[in-house]
Image (cartoon, rainbow, N blue to C red):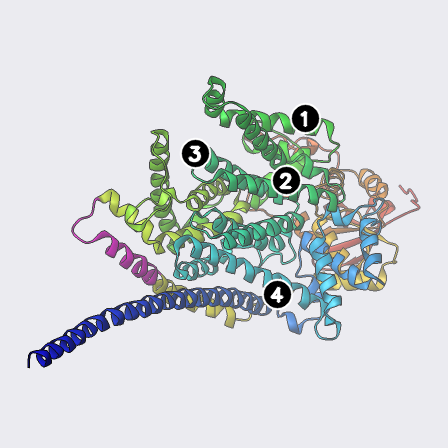
Amino acid sequence: MSSGAADLRQRKKQNCTESDKMPTSDFFFSLFFYILWEDIYMLIQRFAKLFFGCLAAVTSGMMYAVYLSTYHERKFWFSSRQELEREITFPGDSAIYYSFYKELLKAPSFERGVYELTHNNKTISLKTINAVQQMTLYPELIASVLYQASGSEEVIEPVYFYIGIVFGLQGIYVTALFVTSWVMSGTWLAGMLTVAWFIINRTDTTRIDYSIPSRENWALPYFACQVAALTGYLKKTLNCSAEKFCYLLVSASTYTFMMMWEYSHYLLFVQAVSLFLLDSFALAQTEKVHEVYKIYLFSLCVGYLLQFENSALLVSPLLSLVAALMLSKCLQMNMKKGTFMSRLLKIMYVYLVLMITVTLNFLLKMFVPHRENEHLLKFIEVKLGLNTTKNFTMNWLLCQESLQAPSQDFFLRLTQSSLLPFYILVLIICLFSVTQVIFRRICGEPLKETVKLEDGRIGERPEIVYHVIHTILLGCLAMCLEGMKYLWTPYVCMLAAFGVCSPELWMTLFKWLRLKAVHPILLALILSMAVPTIIGFSLWKEFFPRIMTELSELQEFYDPDTVELMTWIKRQAPVAAVFAGSPQLMGVIKLCTGWMVSSLPLYNDDDLLKRNENIYQIYSKRSAEDIYKILTSYKANFLIIEDSICNEVGPVRGCRVKDLLDIANGHVVCEEDDSYADSKYGRFCHEIKMNYSPYVNYFTRVYWNRSYFVYKINTVISFQS
C-alpha cells in the first residue's frame, strides 16, 4: 500500500510539473507571435501610409497638369486654331524660345541644328550670337531630342508636345511641394492642403498663364524637387539609404536647375545664405551643410563647362560665398581648439565669411572677363533710392509691373483664401521657437538628438529652421519686387499647410500657454486633423465652383490685326528683309514668319539693350533723318509702327514709352507743372502717318490696319522740297 501510494504521489508530482511547464512555453510562444504580428502590422501601416501618400502626391500633380491643359484650351481655343494663331499666343521672349525649338525640328540633323544655334546669324541683323548660351536654350534642346527620339512626329504636333512637357513639369512642381509639406509635418494631409492653396492662388503662385515657354516655368519644378530632397536630407532621424537617396536627388536637381535658368545661381545664393545662417547657429549637422556646399561647387564647375564657359557663373555671388565658407572652415579647423585666436574666429565667423565673400567676388570680377550686366547694379541703386537716372532702359525696367512693390490686391487675395493669416501664425510660432533654441545654444545647453512630440520644441528641427529662414529671405525680396512673389508664394502655401497639420507646432504653442485643462498631446493631435479639415472644406465650398466655372467657360482670344500682319509679311516681304519695331513685336515676327529682326526682347546683353533703346526712338520727338540713320545702321528694310504704343494711355503717367523717351532725350522737364521743353520736331510715329516731306523721302507706307503701320525704308532717297 505504501509503495503504491508513493508511486501515485510521484506521478501526480510529475503531472503537476508538466502542467506548470506548458503554460510558460505557450506564453513565450504567444509573446513571440504577438511581437512579430505587431512588427508586421506596423510595417504594413507604414507601407500603406507611404503608398497612399505617394499616390495622393502623384495624383495631385497629374490633376494639376490636366487642369492647366484644360484651362489653356478653354482660354485660347488652341485645338481649333491654325498654327499662326496658336503661335501669337506666345508673347515677347516666350516667342523667341519657341522659335528656336521650331528651328531645331526643321534642321536636317540635331547636330546641325545645335551648330546653327551656337553660330546664329539669321535672327538679329549684323549680329552673330550663341543662342544656346545667351538665351539658355537647353529646355528646347531636350524637348526637340525627346520629340524626335520618341517618334512623336506622326502622333502629336510639335506645339502640343512642347506645352505638354511644360504642363507636366508644373505637375512635378506641385508634387514636390506636396512631398515637402508631407516630410515636414509627417502627414500627407498637409500636402493636400498645400496643393489646394497653390491652385486657388494660381494668379500669384505661377506665371504659366502668361508665358508658357519662359525659363522659370522650366526651371522652378527642378528647384522644388531640390528643396524637397534638401528637406529630407537635413532631417536628423534619417536612415543611411534614405540619406544617400536625398543627397543624390539634391545633386541632380541642383545641377539641372542651374542649366535651365540663367538666373538660377541667384536663387541658389539665397538658399546658400539660409544654410549658412542655419549652420552659424549650430542648428544643423555641419557635415551635411558642407556637403550641400560641395554640390553647389560641382554644379557651378560643370555648368561653366557645359554652358560654353559661361563667365557669369564664375563671378556669381554663389561661388564667392561657397568659397568663403569653405575657406573659413579650413581656418577654423587648422586653429588649435581653446586658443584665443580660435575663439575669436568663432565669434567673428559671420563677419569673416562676409568679408571673404565680398573680397573674392571683387577679385573674380577684376580678373575674370565677364559680361555681367552693369544695368543690374544700377537698377538696384535706383530701386533703393541711392541714385537717380534719366536713362530710358533703366526707367523702363523700373516701370515694369514685376519690378515694382506688390500691390494691396496681392495681400488681399492671399487673405481671402485664408493663406496669409495662417502663414503669419505659423511663421511667428516657428520664429519664437527658433529664438528659444538659439538662446539655449548661447547658454551652452546642447540640442536633443531626437525631439519628441511632448517636448514642444519645433525650433530644434533643422529642416524647419531652414524653411523659416528661406521663406523670410524670399519674402523680403517679394516685398521689393512683385515678380519675386512667384518664388515666395508657393513656399508660403507649403509652410502654412505644414504648420496647421503639424502636431509639434500645436504642442509648441500649448507649452508656451501651459495648457493643463485638456491633455496637450491629445488636443494637438485633434487640432492637427480638425483645423486643416475645416480649412479644406471651406476652401472647397468657396473656390471649387469658381475653378469649375473657369474650366467650363469659353474665353475669347482673338487678335486679327496681328494675324493679318504676319500673313502679309509671309506673303509680301522679301525673304532677306529685316524688320524693325518694338522688341516684343519682333519676337512674335521671328516666331511666326522666320524673318530677321533688328532687336529682341532680351535684357541680358548690353548691345541688345542699346538696340532696343535706339529703335524705340520711333516713338520719340526726333527728326525723320535721325530715325532713318538709326534704322539703316542696323540694315533694317521695314519699319512697323504700333498704334497701341504711339497712342498709349498708361495708368501711370511717366511710365509710357513715349514719356520715358522724352525724359531721356531732354524733351520734357520733370517739374511740378510738367512743362514740355521746346522741340523742333513732332512725335515721329504721328508725323510719319501724315505722308508729307521729308518723311515720304525716307519711308514709304506699304501696309496698314487698325493696329499696325508698315513702312518700307527707302534705299535711294530723292530729296524733294
Q: Which residue is mark 4?
A: 557
Packing grade of label 4 (10 A; few <14, some 14-19, many >=20) is few
The answer to whether marks 4 and 1 mark residues whose Cβ atoms lie closer than 8 Å is no
Q: Earlier in the sequence, mark 4 or mark 1?
A: 1
Q: Earlier in the sequence, mark 4 or mark 3?
A: 3
Q: Which percent across, then down, holds residue 430?
A: 36, 43
- CA distance separating discs 4 and 2: 46 Å
Q: Amino acid at mark 4?
A: Phe
Q: Earlier in the sequence, mark 4 or mark 2?
A: 2
Q: Amino acid at mark 3?
A: Phe
Packing grade of label 2 (10 A; few <14, some 14-19, many >=20) is some
Above or below for 599 versus 177: above
- CA distance separating discs 2 and 3: 23 Å
The answer to whether marks 4 and 2 mark residues whose Cβ atoms lie closer than 8 Å is no
Q: Which residue is mark 1?
A: 363
- CA distance separating discs 4 and 3: 54 Å
Q: Which residue is mark 2?
A: 297
